[in-house]
Amino acid sequence: MARSATPRNDPPLETSIPAGTAPLESIPCSEDLQCRPSRPPDHEKENRALVELVSALADSPTTIFQTLVETIQDITQSDTAGLSLLTRDDNTPDPSGKWFYWPAITGMWKSRIGGGTGRDSTPCGVVIDQNRSLLFRHFQRCYPFFLTVTPAPEEALLAPFHIAGKGVGTIWAVMHSDRRKFDAEDDRVMNSLGKFASSAFQALKHIGDLKIQVAEREKAEAENVALLEEINQASVFEEIIGSSGTLRKVLLEVAKVAPTDSTVLIMGETGTGKELVARAIHKRSKRSGRAFIRVNCAAIPASLIASELFGHEKGAFTGALQRRAGHFEAANGGTIFLDEIGELSLETQISLLRVLQEREFQRVGSSQPVSVDLRVLAATNRDLDAAVAAGTFRQDLLYRLNVFPICVPPLRARKNDIPLLVQYLVEQFARENGKRITEIQKKTLSLFQAYDWPGNIRELQNVIERAVILCDGNALSVDESWLQGRSNNQQPRPMLSPVGMLADDRKDFVHRERKTIEGALAACEGRVSGPHGAAAKLGIPRQTLDSKIQNLDIDKRRFKSLSPTQRPA
Ligand SMILES: Nc1ncnc2c1ncn2[C@@H]1O[C@H](COP(=O)(O)OP(=O)(O)OP(=O)(O)O)[C@@H](O)[C@H]1O
Ligand SMILES: [Mg+2]
């Protein structure tokens, strides 16, 4: 703020007093107002002005003081009008302040906007102290600072305004000549406008407080949370991150069932970690040294599934050029994990039932039973009870599978795990991308906590991978838009349903599936996972695509540097 000159620098009184001015004792002269002839009140004009002021306060609060002083000048027909606020040294409005700041002036002293005076160098202090409006004549004789201010004041009418009984400022109208004298009506109007000044002051203070709150909130949001150097792994399984009670309950079940040979049915939404749980069971079982064979039931065409699972004899069907062992034989001694078991056709379900009951099956094209010693784990994101009710899943098979059910909870039911998962995933992707990320934006963490994660941990994984790739500094942040536009519990779109396909269609199906996958891989330059990966492009889980790529023997590395002209149509 441009401070005024201090009284020490004021010109000497005696030399500056204009000739013919009033004696000192007649400077405050409010009682004159009652003796002067007064103009009749113009309530219509006053009301109109107040209405305009109220709407100006709503529309442009930051300029309301200036609008107010222009109204004062208009209504009082004065030469100058202004508003003074008591401030602390840092310009903060404060009733105990020692300075008057001039945020708004109009008329002949307009150039003084932004200036001010010490509390005792202006009649404003007296008006605040007496808490009433006062009329002054030639007040520069008492307040020498104003001897330097031109044009000199002839008469000044000042009214205080207050908040909760404490004076915070004054409004004033000044005549610089005797062309017009203030009257009782001016005094009444000034008191009325003083009340408005008080409302405007409160509104501005409220806006100021809101701005501070918003600024503080934004600052808090911009703050980062330090990522731990090492994951303090609360889980008993090093590969399954999380410490929530819900997850711990699941892990306890895993720990109990793992050493047994029981069949386990793992249920849960897509991306919740069902495969991770299956692998954890195998790893902690007595079969851990033997094979873990994962069969993605959704990825194998119905006409092929029998030979895939049970193998075939040479010549069993066209194209069976030699004898081939199936997944059940490959898993002998170890664990077979029947993933996405809810997608099996009814026909295959019957064959599977026999293996589960007797641990025995026949290769396609053979009548010789083959015995196996293996453990069966199965997983699904379907509601198998509903599938039984709908007649698409055999009840006897469900009984066989449902020996020890494990439900993996969705991420939204264990949001406590999010910070730990984020740390783990950031560390993993940062390492892969050769970056060092040590913090995560507080706002990002709040967004993660508020979101429902329909794609569960796989979706979180994808979001973090994308954020790590885009991260330039050491603090991770995500764009809010990445977490929008998806409804809760949305299931992944099936790419092509193999269920119910005729045997003759097989070749065509495999060809089309291969083309579709190769097209997606080419478009994504060989990338399978992540938001820009082929799995996301096709709308299927990454694991599903991985297993299709494996089954179709597609070499995804050859798409890494394809030029557009080389890409398959
Ligand atoms: N608790 C966890 N800690 C660390 N990573 C996890 C956790 N749970 C899941 N993941 C990771 O999330 C991804 C998805 O997990 P997984 O494939 O096991 O899910 P799923 O339930 O089998 O999904 P879908 O039904 O779609 O096949 C995997 O990369 C897995 O490693
Ligand atoms: Mg899975």
Image: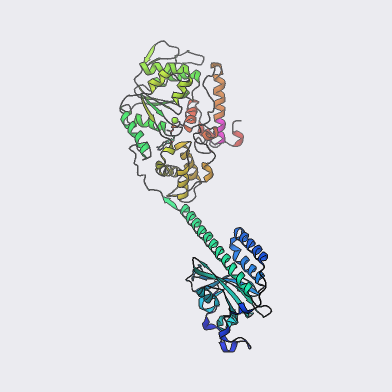
Provide the residue span drawn in magenta: 518-533
Q: Quadrant of residue 341?
A: top left
Residue 52 coordinates in the image, percent (x, y)? 64, 61
Residue drawn at point x = 49 percent, y = 65 percent? 164
Q: Quadrant of residue 79?
A: bottom right
Residue 546, above or below 209: above
530 drawn magenta: yes
Residue 141 coordinates in the image, percent (x, y)? 57, 84
Q: Quadrant of residue 423?
A: top left
Q: Quadrant of ligand 2?
A: top left
Q: Nearer the viewer, residue 47 or 66?
A: 47
Residue, far top: 367
Q: Quadrant of the C terminus?
A: top right
Residue 550, above or below 185: above
Residue 230 coordinates in the image, percent (x, y)? 36, 46
Residue 61 in view, yes or no: yes
Residue drawn at point x = 51 percent, y = 83 percent? 8
Please name the predominant secondary structure of the magenta segment in the image.
Answer: loop
